[in-house]
Amino acid sequence: MANHKILIQRLYICLGKRDGPGMANLYHDEATFTDPGFGLLNAEQTRGMWKMLCERGKDLRVQFEVKHVDDEVGQCNWQAWYTFSGTGRQVHNQITSDFTFKDGKIYRQVDHFNFHRWSRQALGLPGLLFGWSGFLQAKVRQKALAGLANFMQKKAQSESKA
């Protein structure tokens, strides 16, 4: 149980330091991640997402509080302050993460946040007017997944040249 608490703490400490590779190492090889912005990601995509967000989040600031942890599951409330790269707008997102663990690693992570609140901050007027709609959420998810795929492809190409 204590190890799982440390695992969650390490995840958000790494995020606060913008240490994407450090975050990636905390996930099981069969891990999944789900949130309103990206949808369901596999382990490789999850690792890539954190690396991408850490590289792009130049002004990222994080606070977290582990709410519950036991041998199988955990929960953490956390907040992130950052500039949304798509619009240059400031965002303060409040998230609850639910975790499942396997073999001493994060096996499942499901992040919950108010998408409408997030979209008002990140997207401005379009988010205010349409952030409640499934249409806007689908468009944001489509763009996020395309950006992640592009980031991962470029990383793979640069690593193969090295």
Image (spheres, grey):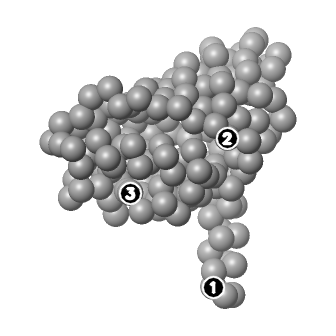
Specify the label residue 26 is tagged with.
3
Q: Where is residue 115 shown, x and y percent of the image?
A: 59, 22
Q: Nearer the viewer, residue 54 or 36?
A: 54
Question: Between tags 3 and 2, which lies in front?
Answer: 2
Within 10 Å of the Cα at label 1, are there few (<14), some (14-19), or many (20+) other Cα atoms? few
Marks 2 and 1, Cα distance to the nearest angstrom? Answer: 29 Å
Q: Is residue 113 left or right of residue 77?
A: right
Q: Nearer the viewer, residue 68 or 124?
A: 68
Q: Is residue 40 left or right of residue 142?
A: left
Sequence-first tag of 3 and 2: 3
| Residue appearing at x 82%, y 16% in the figure | 125
Specify the label residue 160 is tagged with.
1
Residue corresponding to mark 2: 60
Marks 3 and 2, Cα distance to the nearest angstrom? Answer: 20 Å
Q: Where is residue 70 shown, x and y percent of the image?
A: 18, 36
Sequence-first tag of 1 and 3: 3
Q: Is residue 95 left or right of residue 115?
A: left
Question: Between tags 2 and 1, which lies in front?
Answer: 2
Check the image and report above or below for 53 versus 116: below
Q: What's the amino acid at mark 3?
A: Leu
Q: Is residue 13 left or right of residue 133?
A: left
Sequence-first tag of 2 and 1: 2
Q: Where is residue 76 shown, x and y percent of the image?
A: 38, 31
| Residue appearing at x 60%, y 26% in the figure | 93
| Residue appearing at x 66%, y 88% in the figure | 162
Marks 1 and 3, Cα distance to the nearest angstrom? Answer: 24 Å
